Image (spheres, helix red, strand yellow):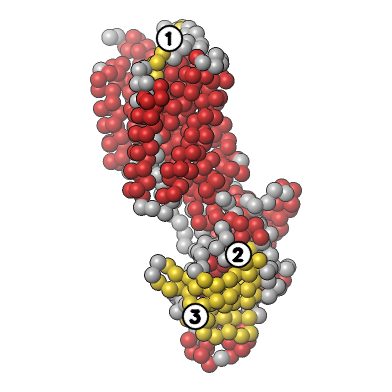
Amino acid sequence: MLLVENINVYYGAIHALKGVSVEVKEGEIVTLIGANGAGKSTTLRTISGMLKPKTGKILFEGQDIAGMAAQNIVKLGLSQVPEGRRIFANMSVLENLELGAYIRNDSKEIKEDLEKIFKRFPRLAERKTQMAGTLSGGEQQMLAMGRAMMSRPRILLLDEPSMGLAPLLVKEIFSIIQDINATGTTILLVEQNAHMALSIAHKAYVLETGRISLSGTAKELAASEEVRKAYLGA
Amino acid sequence: MDSSSFLMQFAQQLINGVSLGSIYALIALGYTMVYGTIKLINFAHGDVYMVGAYIGFFATTVLGLGFLPALLLAMVGAGILGMFIERAAYRPLRNAPKIAVLITAIGVSLFLEYGSMLLVTPQPRTFPAVLSSTPIHIGGLIINSQQVLILGVSLFLMVVLTYVVNYTKLGKAMRAVSFDTDTARLMGIDVDKVISYTFAVGSALAAAAGVLVGVYYNSIDPLMGIMPGLKAFVAAVLGGIGVIPGAMLGGVLMGVIEALVSGFISSTFRDAAAFGILIIILLFKPAGLLGKNIREKV
C-alpha cells in the first residue's frame, strides 16, 4: 500500500534521512522506532508531503506522491496525526473534527462519522462545544486521532501518540490504535516508546541517525539483543 | 456649558464617533485578517481602500450606477485587486524573511498611490451626491442620514463576516490556517487559496469603507488612504491584531476617541490623542484589548 523507496531528505545542509526505505502493507500496523533525532518524524512528514525528498520515491497505492502538496495527499486517503497533536486550540472540539473532514462534501456521512468518533471517544462527546485547548493531554491526543479519522483515511500516520501521557492513558491510546486498525485502517506508527509500539505492531523498523538499521517482524525485533539493549532497557 | 448641553454634546460626538469608527473598523478587519493568516502588516491596505473609493466614484459618474451597485462593484473590484497583490507581490516571498515582505508591502503601497496619481491625476475628485443627506432630529441630536447609512452598511458587512468566519467551511479554514498553517495543510486545506480569499475579503471590506467615506466627505484623492490606513492599523493593534472582534472594537473605539477629542478639546489634538491612547493601552495590555495568548498543552 505504501512503499517508501530510498528517500534522502535534507534540512538545509543537514542530511536528515539517508536512503530510508519502508514498506507498509494493507491492514498492517507498522512501527518506526528509534531515539530522539533519528529521523522518525522527518520520515512521516516527508510521506505526508510536509517535506520534499531530494531523491527517492514514495509510492502510495502505486502512485508516486513524493513532493506532492500535503493537501492533495490527504485527498488520496493518507492522513497524519502530527507530533504534539497540533489540535486547533482556539476552536471547539466539534470544529476540530469538522476540519478533519475538510476534504469531504458528503455532509450526511460526515455526521454519521462524527457519531462514530463520539462513540469511540465518549469524552470528546461530553466536551463537544468546549475549546480544544482546554482538554487534557490525553483528550487532545484522542481529538487529534479523531480529527485524522474524519478524512476517512486508508492509512493513518501517527507521530508519537504516547508523548507526554501517563502510562494508563498510553495503554488506552494504544488499544484505540489497535481498534482503528481492526476496523480496516492501515497504520504507520512512529514511537519512542518502543515497548508499547512493538507490542501492537506487526512489523517494525529501527531508525538510527537517518538510516534504517534494523527491520523485521515486531516479535523478532522485540527479541533481538540490540533492540532490547538500546530501546527496551533490558 | 451647563450639564444638559454637555450631555447633548457628548451624545452627539458619540454618534459622530461611532459612524467614523465603523469605517476604521471595516479597514482594520483587513489588516487583522491578513495578519492572522500570514503575519504580515499589509501596508498597502489603506491604498486598496482608496482604489475602492475610486471604483465607486467611476461606477457612479461614468457608469451612472446607484449607490448599492457601485458599492458592490467597488467591493468586487478591490477584492480582485487584493488577490492579485497577494499573488504577485507576497506569495513569491512566502518563505522570505518577514522584513522583505514588509518592505514589499510598502512598495505596493507607493505603487498604488503614485500609480493612481498617474492614472486619475492627483486632483481631488468630488464624489457625486448619490444619496441625499437629510439631517434626522432625535430630541436635540442630529443624525445625518448618511451616518445612518454608514452604520447600517458597516454593521451588515460585519455581521456577514462574523457569520462567514464562524460558521462556513471557508471561515473555519481561515481560522485553521491562522492558528497553525502546517496542520491546516494536513487537513487537506489549500493554504494558498485560503490566503488569497482572505485578501479578497479584507480588500472588499476596505473598498466598502472607501465608498462610504466618499459618500460622506464628498472628496477623494489618491493619497486619501494613508491616514485612515494608519489609524485602522492602530485600531487593529488596539483591539488585538489577528482577532476579528478586536478590529471591530478597536475601530469603533478609535472613532469615538477622535470625535470626543475634536468635540471637547480641539480637532488638532485628535490624532495625537488617538495614538496616545494606543500607547497607553499597549503599555498595560500588549496583546491588545481582546488579544489573548492561549497557552497550549503539550
**Label 2 to label 1, Cα distance in Å?**
66 Å
Q: What chain does mark 2 sit on? A: A
Extreme-bottom residue of the structure: A225
Q: Which mark is residue A211?
A: 3
Q: Position of residue B224 (x, y in %)?
A: 36, 24
Q: Is residue A193 left or right of residue A175?
A: left
Q: What chain does mark 3 sit on? A: A
Q: Is residue A109 visible?
A: yes
Q: Which residue shows up at 38% across the image and 53% down it?
A: B96
Q: Position of residue A150 (x, y in %)?
A: 66, 57
Q: Quadrant of residue B185?
A: bottom right
Q: Position of residue A79 (x, y in %)?
A: 61, 62
Q: Is residue A173 visible?
A: no
* Residue type at numbered disc 3: Arg
* Residue type at numbered disc 1: Ile
In the image, is residue B109 above or below residue A18? above
Q: Is residue A53 left or right of residue A172?
A: left
Q: Which residue shows up at 57% across the image and 50% down it?
A: B190
For the residues bearing labels 2 and 1, Cβ distance under 8 angstroms: no
Q: Position of residue A96 (x, y in %)?
A: 58, 52
Viewer-proximal residue among A219 and A25: A25
* Marks 2 and 1 belong to one chain: no
Extreme-front residue of the structure: B118
Residue mark closest to the camera, 2 vs 1: 2
Q: Secondary structure at mark 3?
A: strand
Residue at which label 1 appears = B142
Q: Secondary structure at mark 1?
A: strand
In the image, is residue B36 above or below residue B54? below
Residue at which label 2 appears = A65
Q: Quadrant of the N terminus of chain A?
A: bottom right
* Residue type at numbered disc 2: Ile
Q: Is residue A62 left or right of residue B65?
A: right
